[in-house]
Amino acid sequence: MGHAKEIITMDVYADNRGIIADGAPEIEAYMKEVLPNPEETEIFKKELLEIVVDVTEFLPDAV
């Protein structure tokens, strides 16, 4: 006696970000924490560009 086997597959086309954001409001604070914020990134870049390191002790004396 043989046994029949079937493999059933299904493709799901959905917006997973929308599902997570709409379906789980309790993790909104976590999502805000881990997702990059473009405004904060730009502020961070500008602050990094304002840093000036004193390297005169590493440069040779000018003659």
Image: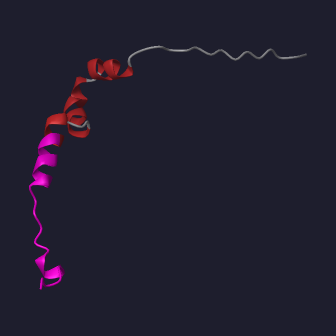
Nearer to me, 60 or 20: 60
The quarter in which the N terminus is drawn is top right
The residue at the point 12 percent across, 68 percent down is: 53
Which quadrant: the C terminus?
bottom left
Inspect the magenta stretch and tell me whether residue 20 lies in it. Answer: no
Residue at the outermost front position: 63
In this rendered view, identify the residue nearer to me: 33 or 62: 62
Q: Magenta part of the protein: which range?
A: 42-63
Residue 5 % position (x, y): 77, 17
Residue 25 relative to residue 51: left or right: right
Residue at the image point whose x is 22% and y is 28% from the top = 26
Q: Nearer the viewer, residue 35 or 26?
A: 35
Q: In the rendering, at what x and y percent does residue 12 appear?
A: 50, 14
Q: Residue at x 26, y 36 (%)?
A: 35
Horizontal side of 27 relative to 61 (left or right) equals right
Question: Which of these two is toward me, 61 or 34?
Answer: 61
Q: Is residue 63 above or below residue 50?
A: below
Q: Position of residue 4 (x, y in %)?
A: 80, 14
- Determine the residue positioned at 47% across, 13% down: 13
